[in-house]
Image: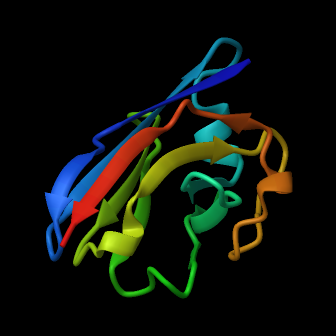
Amino acid sequence: QVQLEESGGGSVQAGGSLRLSCAVSEYTYAGATINRNCMGWFRQTPGKEREGVATINADGTTGYADSVKGRFTISKDNAQNTLYLQMNSLKPEDTAMYYCAASNWRTYCSSGGDSAEYNTWGQGTQVTVSS
């Protein structure tokens, strides 16, 4: 069983930066998910569907939504069992609840962020960007 817990959200002015973290807790084999499976970040605003932001595969390869390319960076620390999302040059349209997600069997996930490929979700952390 895997649990995900996000942190690092907050309020920032446009042009600012935030780093989100996602702690991965496992109760069977520690490190299995972050080492073997793909993980990603999604975001959602009220009344809209959840959208993929960034994906990182088991081998460390990454994919990004066009709207965040060049501004956001997804990374992971396998030893610390933690997923990160570094967000720079933030814009008001980046305001959303951000969710960490993990697949329990896929090694690779679609770079576009298909939520159907993920089995486990965190509770989310709010990011608010003011103009």
Q: Residue 80 at what x, y percent from top left? A: 38, 34
Q: Position of residue 89 (x, y in %)?
A: 22, 78
Figure coloring: rainbow
Report the quarter where the N terminus lies.
top right
Q: In the picture shown, does residue 7 fall above or below 1? A: below
How many labels, in total? 0
Q: In this view, does 66 lie to the left or right of 103?
A: left
The part of the image, by quadrant, that contains residue 115 is bottom right
Residue at 67 percent of width and 57 percent of height: 50
Residue, x 68% and y 43% (percent of image)? 102
**Quarter of the figure with residue 120:** top right
State the residue at coordinates (55%, 44%).
Answer: 100
Q: Residue furthest front?
A: 47
Residue 126 at x, y percent in the picture:
38, 43
**Relative depth, front residue between 3 and 58:** 3
- Point 64% across, 44% down: residue: 101
Give percent across and percent down for residue 114: 78, 64
The answer to which quarter of the image holds residue 110 is bottom right
Q: In which quarter of the image is the C terminus?
A: bottom left
From the viewer's perspective, is 22 left or right of 9?
Answer: right
Residue 73 in sight in this render: no
Asked if residue 103 can be seen in this view, the reply is yes
The relative height of residue 92 versus residue 76 in the rendered view (above or below) is below
